[in-house]
Amino acid sequence: MTEEKGGSAQRTSLQGYWSSRMAFILAVTGSAVGLGNIWKFPYITGQNGGGAFVLVYLFCVVLVGMPVMMSEILLGRRGRRNPVATMALLGAEEGGSTHWRWIGSMGVLAGILILSYYSVIAGWSLAYIEKSLSGVFSGASSDEVSGIFNMFIGDWKMVAGAHTLFMFLTVFVVARGVERGLEQAVRFMVPALFLLLLALLGYSINTGHFGEGVSYLFTPNWHALTWGTVLIALGQAFFTLSIGMGAIMAYGAYLPEETSITGSAASVVVADTSIAILSALVIFPIVFANGLDSAEGAGLVFHTLPLAFGQMGGGVFFATIFFILLTFAAWTSAIGLMEPAVAWIVESYGRTRAQAAVIVGVLIWAIGLGSVLSFNVLADFKFLNRTIFENVDYLTSNIMLPLGGLLITFFAGWVMCRNSSSDELGGATSIYKIWRFLARWVAPIAILFVFLKAIGWLPEFSG
Ligand code: TRP
C-alpha cells in the first residue's frame, strides 16, 4: 500500500448528481427498507429461535454492515461509473488489475437473482391490497386467514399474475429513469410506514402477548444458535441494508464530493434497523396471542397482520393502506436491485435505458417463475432439502452478498491506498480510523470465519 498509488479524485459522474444529501439518503433508505424488514426479518427470526439470532444480527449490522456500506459508497463516489466499470477503473488505478470488476459482475447477477423471488413476494403484497379492500379479513379466525393465504399461494396462476404485474411496474419506473417520482414516493412512504407500524405496535401492546414477544426477541437462547444460523443472521444484515452487490456503489456514484459518507450511512442503518425491529415487535405478540407457529416461514406476516387488522376498528382501511405501503417499499427496493444490471447494459452495450430495463425485466420475470412454482406445483421439488425459492434466497443472501462484502471491504481497506480512502471519508479523523480498522480486520475476518464455520471447515471448540 504505497502512497504513490491511487488516482486523482474528482472524476465526474456520467449521469448527474443527487440534488441534495437528503435525496441520497432517501434513495438509499428506499432501497434498504423493503420486504427484508417487514416480511423477511420476522419470519427468519421465528425460524431461528428469536433472541440470540436478533442479537447476532444487530452485531452484524454494526460491525460488518456499517463498514461495508461506507466502503461501497466511497468506492462508488471514487469511480463514478456503474459497479462493473467502477471496480475495473479503481482496480487498475489502485490495485493494478481490472479483474476487480468481477465484484461488480457478481453484484449484477445477485441483483437479478434476488429480484426474481423478491418480485414474487411483492406480488403477494399486491394481491393482499385487493384482498384487504374486499373485507375478507374482517372478523376472520386465524384458520380462515391461513386458509385464504394457502388458497392464494396454491394457485400458481394468481401468484404468477401478481409477479408479472409487479415486474411490469418495476420495469416501467426503471425505464423512465429513477430520479423524480421515486424520490417523492420514498419521502412519503418511509415515514408513513413507520407511523403505521407504530399504530400497530399500539394494537400489539393492548391485545397481543406483548411481554412474551419482547422476551422472545431479546432474551438470547444461545442453545438455539448454530454457525448455520449465524450465517443466516449475517446474510440478513447484508440483505436488509442492500449491501454486498454494488447497488449502494451505483448510488454512491452520484453523490456530491462534499457530502459526509459516514453520516449518510449512519442515518440509513438507523432507519432500516428500527423498521425491522418495530415489525418484529408488532408481529410476535400477535403470534403468541393467537397460538400461531412462530417458525411457520414465509407466510408469517401474511397470517399475523390480516388477522390483527380483521379484529380492529377501521381494519379494512388500515390493512389496505398497510399493503399499499408494503408494495411501495418493495417497489423502491426492486428498482435498486435492477439498477446495476441496467446501468451495466446501458454503458457496455450502448442500449437505451428502456431497452435495457425490458431485457433485464423479462429475464428476471422468467427466472422468477421458478419461485412462483415453489409454493404450489413444485413445492416438493427440493435440492439440498430446499425449494427453488429457498435455494435462490440462500445462495444470494448467505453466500453472494457476504462474499461481495468481503471483497469490497478487502479492496477498500487493503488494496486502495490510504490517501484515497481518507480523502473520501473526510480526512484521517478518529471515525476514519475506526472505519479502517473495521474494514481491514473485523468485517473480512468475521465474514470468512462465519463462512468456514457454517460449512464445517473449522473445528468446533466445544461439544
Ligand atoms: N434491502 C432490500 C430489503 O430489505 C432488499 C435488497 C437487497 C436490495 N439487496 C438490494 C434492494 C439491493 C435494493 C438494492 O427489502
Image (cartoon, rainbow, N blue to C red):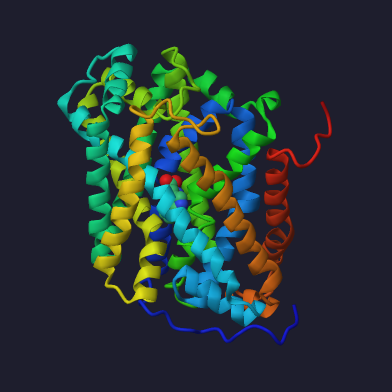
As drawn, is 322 to the left or to the right of 131?
right
Where is residue 235 shown, x and y percent of the image?
57, 44
Residue 97 screen position, x and y as percent: 63, 77
301 left or right of 228? left
Please provide percent x and percent y for residue 370: 37, 39
**Residue 297 drawn above or below residue 39:** above
- Up the image or down, 418 lies above or below 296; here it is below
| 30 shown above or below 290 | below
Q: Is residue 296 above or below residue 334?
A: above
Residue 259 can be seen, yes or no: no
Q: Quadrant of residue 312?
A: top left
Determine whether, in the image, residue 199 is placed left or right of residue 133. right
Tell me the quarter of the picture where residue 96 sits.
bottom right
Q: Quadrant of residue 6?
A: bottom right
Q: How many marks?
A: 0
x 44%, y 19%: residue = 287
- Residue 389 or residue 192, whichever sits in front: 389
Residue sitting farthest toward the right: 461
Q: Is 347 in front, or is 295? A: 347
Q: Residue at x 66, y 74 (%)?
A: 416
Please report the residue visible at 22 percent of the width from the left and 39 percent of the height from the top. Answer: 161
- 1 lies left or right of 44: right
> Can you see residue 230?
yes
Image quarter of the N terminus:
bottom right
Q: Quadrant of the C terminus?
A: top right
Name which residue lies at 40% across and 19% down. 206
Q: Tell me where residue 214 appears, x and y as whole percent.
A: 54, 25
